[in-house]
Image (cartoon, rainbow, N blue to C red):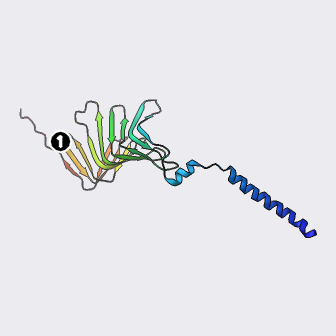
Amino acid sequence: MQASYRLYPVIALALIAAGSILLEQATRVDEPAGEAMRSGAPDFVAERSRIVGFGVDGAERYELLAETIVPFPAAAPLRLHQPRLLLRTVDSVTRIVAQGAEVSPGGEQVDFAGGVEVDRRTEGDPTPPRLRSETLSVWPDSHRARSDTPVRLTQGASTATARGLRADNLFGTLELIGDVEVHMPSRQQNPS
């Protein structure tokens, strides 16, 4: 009989543990966010969307338009279909269009892909530069861009091609990388 008294606490603990497990299972709420992360499904899909970014001075710095924006849960990139990015500075507007793009989770980097076209319009410039490539990575806050695929840069009748480029608008530099070819027609001077 004395041995049975020693089993009562063990039996009571086992019943409490079993009851806790049953109670936890009965009151568990399915987590749709966890399910979406496991299934790879997007949080939502936004169509014909516009995102505007402002600087510390309150002036509009960029405008991002897209036919569809597809955000995924957690740290996955934001996917854009037919994006158009307008970067504004005091004296110019740079327009970037492509078939698709991915935006990093913090928004620091935008990776454009598929028929990337860049046009930069500056006040008083009758022949704005144009860039064509299959890919282009842009860091809007630091005013930098990079492409590791062939690029074609045109301005007026002048053209340049290369295997890639690095650009930094803060310092006003554009570096063409690998097998660079430049065609600049000669200017005809009028004899006096």
Q: Position of residue 87 (x, y in %)?
A: 37, 37
Q: Which residue corresponds to the image point at 88% horizontal and 66% vertical from the top-left?
A: 6
Position of the C terminus, as image quadrant, is top left
Q: Amino acid at mark 1?
A: Ala
As drawn, the residue found furthest toward the left would be 192
Badge 1 density bin: few <14, some 14–19, many ≥20, Cα 10 Å = few
Location of residue 125 (image quadrant): top left
> Is residue 48 at least partly visible in the picture?
yes
Q: Position of residue 155 (x, y in %)?
A: 22, 41
Q: Position of residue 92 (x, y in %)?
A: 32, 33
Position of the N terminus, as image quadrant, is bottom right
Question: Image check: 188 left or right of 179?
Answer: left
- 36 vs 170: above or below: below
Query: 128 or 14: nearer the eye?
Result: 14
> Is residue 142 at least partly visible in the picture?
no
Q: How many marks?
A: 1
Location of residue 158 (image quadrant): top left
Q: Which residue corresponds to the image point at 47% horizontal and 33% vertical from the top-left?
A: 56
Q: Which residue corresponds to the image point at 21% horizontal and 46% vertical from the top-left?
A: 159
Q: Secondary structure at mark 1?
A: loop
Query: 51 or 152: nearer the eye?
Result: 51
Q: Position of residue 45 (x, y in %)?
A: 45, 42
Location of residue 47 (image quadrant): top left
Question: Image check: 164 left or right of 26?
Answer: left
Query: 73 or 56: nearer the eye?
Result: 73
Q: Where does label 1 land, which residue?
A: 157
- 115 vs 91: above or below: below
